[in-house]
């Protein structure tokens, strides 16, 4: 690696060093309490997957270039030069970490591995060694936002075609629109993913609840966050914020996508609207009696996978349980405490990498498959697209014999007219 | 030899304390002046009051208790003993009525504070010899534990000598005289202090303590100050 490249990468590193990041980089005593926390280590047993080991990959570079000791006495902290080999290690550490933050629950100081891995991801972007597919997806997303007019007509035609599906689930009055779009003054802006599965059930439930809602032109998913590019993350986020402000909505409801929810909830700053996950909205409708569900619809035992970014990192824990207890008399918890629930193994952009890392995703999430099977449930539900894909792959790979369902689809299927 | 004793017991002590206070102060000011993270780093479920839970996490180490109970026992023993050790050293400077709420002889703990610390430090050290902690550890982790062990061990020897071996040549009076002279910037070494049979214990104790104090601001032992704000970040 030439000096110019190294200097540029170190500038990127420097840019990440805020108060919290320095706390995390300065304090770890390598006590090893986090050893059992990572699902990858618990499934595969390799030291390199222990949270503290991942931290050290980044910390060694930090010590070398940002600490006096790294210059005077580098061997004492094993300070390490930023080289091609270091980049390979950074890749291995960052793209085997799903950013689930389960290790944070174990660490006596609460060191955030996801945050430390964000340095690794940014350095990989700077060195153009990040997974290309993630950057491509992020760029496409950004481009789509820039040239909305080009996509608008195709989008509206596609939505029109879905309306029949929505009406099949919930009949609406003549003259009403099954999927309203671009409604100025709507109470709620729903931000979905591309695909009927994210729009149809949600639309039916909004209509059933009599919600004054509108569908966003934009996709919720934030590939900028997956690849760890703060600029693209902000660009993708801002277009939804702008749309919400333009339509003067009171609430932005994010579909079943953990990263999209967390980014919107925690990164959008103070805005004139509330941010909710679709699970929170459905739970609210049930509590307020705005929708009713048929408990006899699902007769088999159900278990729920808490998406890390929605539950442990987003605080939506009670709501899915409230919904599930209204849907079934046989809801079975996976973990005595949701904050200890194992990650599915698909977060942090890993699912988006597709077949390339399927083998790793399956091996690294064995503990998740075991956890699901121990419940004896026949229906496995979740509220995140990534988790759904990963759990479906695990279901096939480990022959778990469960049906993987979106929670919102279950609510829509059980709606009582 | 006298000159070595003098350097360790007087100028080096001043240098060590200067490095410790200035280094720690500067590092803390620099850290807390860094920009805050733009998003919350909280882990849910939310529990309130958050400050109380952050204090609970910092001082009772519930995550360690849950995941590694044996390690937790040693950690608690170590940290409580360390606190008693600091009180013990303050009492070697002068009388503090508040510490005598529970009546005791100076140095407090009847020698057991040092013993518990020594055993705990050996435990912390030896657990790093086994995988996976061995693979996670870096040299400074060993150096610090060895340094701290040597400091505690030679310090405890002076206490044990008086308490357990009836070796009373060096008493609290001599230590108080020495420490007070340092504190009031009128350093003085009495011949009793430097010519006693186990003066070398004192010299070694002070030497390793000096090294430890000088290393403190630049090491992960800064967690003494950072653990609470970090736990507060986790609690939101």
Image (tube, rainbow, N blue to C red):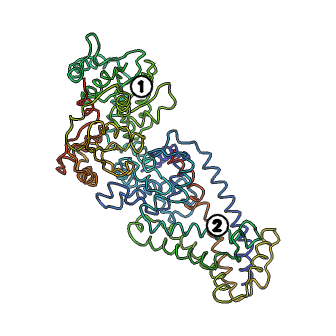
- Disc 1 crowd, CA 10 A, few/some/many (<14, 14-19, 20+): some
Question: Which residue is at the front of the view, A21 or B101?
Answer: B101
Residue shown at 50% from the left, 27% from the top: A271
What residue is disc 1 on? A239
User: Considering the image in quadrants, where does the C terminus of chain A appear?
Assistant: top left
As helix, strand or loop, the secondary structure at mark 2 comes to helix
Figure check: B112 above or below A154:
below
Q: In terms of secondary structure, where does tag 1 sit?
A: helix
Quarter of the image for residue A291 reads top left
Nearest the viewer among B127 and B208 is B127
Q: Residue A131: where, in percent of width, then height?
A: 32, 43
x then y, percent, for residue B88: 68, 72
Q: Are marks 2 and 1 on the same chain?
A: no
Question: Mark 1 — on which chain does it sit?
Answer: A
The disc at residue A137 is: none
Quickly name the residue at label 2. Answer: B213
């Amino acid at each position: 690696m030439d000096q110019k490249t190294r200097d540029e990468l170190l500038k990127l590193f420097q840019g990440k060093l805020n108060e919290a990041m320095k706390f995390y980089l300065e304090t770890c005593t390598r006590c090893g309490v986090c050893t059992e926390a990572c699902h990858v280590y618990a499934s595969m047993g390799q030291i390199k997957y222990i949270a503290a080991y991942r931290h050290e990959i980044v910390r060694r570079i930090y010590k070398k270039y940002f600490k006096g000791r790294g210059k005077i006495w580098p061997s004492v902290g094993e300070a390490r030069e930023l080289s091609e080999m270091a980049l390979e290690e950074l890749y291995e550490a960052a793209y085997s970490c799903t950013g689930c933050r389960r290790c944070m629950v174990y660490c006596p100081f609460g060191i955030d591995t996801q945050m430390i891995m964000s340095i690794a991801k940014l350095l990989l972007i700077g060195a153009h060694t990040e997974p290309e597919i993630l950057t491509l997806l992020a760029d496409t997303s950004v481009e789509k936002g820039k040239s909305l007019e080009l996509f608008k007509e195709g989008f509206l035609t596609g939505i029109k075609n879905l309306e029949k599906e929505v009406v099949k689930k919930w009949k609406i009055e003549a003259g009403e629109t099954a999927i309203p779009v671009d409604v100025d003054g709507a109470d709620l802006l729903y931000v979905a993913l591309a695909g009927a599965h994210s729009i149809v059930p949600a639309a039916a439930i909004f209509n059933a609840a009599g919600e004054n809602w509108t569908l966003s032109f934009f996709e919720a998913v934030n590939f900028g966050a997956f690849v760890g590019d703060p600029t693209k993350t902000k660009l993708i986020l801002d277009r939804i914020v702008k749309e919400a402000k333009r339509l003067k909505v009171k609430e932005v409801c994010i579909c079943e996508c953990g990263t999209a929810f967390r980014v919107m909830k925690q990164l959008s700053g103070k805005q004139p609207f509330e941010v909710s996950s679709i699970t929170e909205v459905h739970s609210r409708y049930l509590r307020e009696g705005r929708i009713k569900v048929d408990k006899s619809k699902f007769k088999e035992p159900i278990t729920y996978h808490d998406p890390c970014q929605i539950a442990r990192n987003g605080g939506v824990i009670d709501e899915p349980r409230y919904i599930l207890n209204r849907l079934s008399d046989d809801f079975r918890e996976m973990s005595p405490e949701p904050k200890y629930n194992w990650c599915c193994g698909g977060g942090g952009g890993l699912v988006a990498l597709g077949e390339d890392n399927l083998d790793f995703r399956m091996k690294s999430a064995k503990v998740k498959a075991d956890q699901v099977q121990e419940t004896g449930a026949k229906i496995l539900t979740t509220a995140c697209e990534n988790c759904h894909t990963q759990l479906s792959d695990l279901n096939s790979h480990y022959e778990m014999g469960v049906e993987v369902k979106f929670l919102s689809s279950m609510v829509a299927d059980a709606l009582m007219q | 030899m006298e000159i070595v004793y003098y350097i360790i017991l007087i100028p080096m002590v001043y240098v060590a304390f200067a490095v410790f206070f200035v280094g720690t102060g500067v590092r803390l000011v620099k850290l807390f002046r860094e920009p805050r993270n733009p998003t919350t780093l909280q882990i849910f479920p939310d529990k309130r009051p958050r400050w109380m839970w952050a204090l609970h996490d910092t001082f009772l180490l519930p995550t360690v208790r849950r995941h590694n109970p044996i390690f937790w026992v040693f950690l608690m023993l170590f940290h409580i003993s360390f606190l008693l050790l600091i009180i013990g050293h303050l009492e070697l400077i002068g009388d503090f009525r508040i510490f005598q709420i529970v009546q005791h002889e100076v140095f407090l703990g009847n020698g057991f504070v040092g013993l518990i610390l020594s055993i705990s430090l050996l435990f912390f050290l030896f657990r790093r010899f086994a995988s996976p902690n061995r693979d996670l550890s870096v040299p400074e982790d060993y150096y610090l534990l060895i340094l701290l062990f040597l400091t505690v061990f030679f310090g405890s020897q002076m206490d044990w000598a008086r308490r357990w071996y009836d070796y009373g040549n060096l008493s609290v009076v001599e230590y108080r005289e020495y420490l007070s002279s340092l504190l009031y910037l009128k350093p003085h070494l009495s011949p009793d202090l430097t010519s006693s049979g186990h003066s070398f214990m004192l010299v070694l104790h002070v030497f390793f303590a000096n090294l430890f104090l000088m290393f403190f601001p630049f090491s992960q032992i800064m967690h003494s100050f950072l653990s609470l704000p970090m736990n507060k970040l986790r609690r939101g």
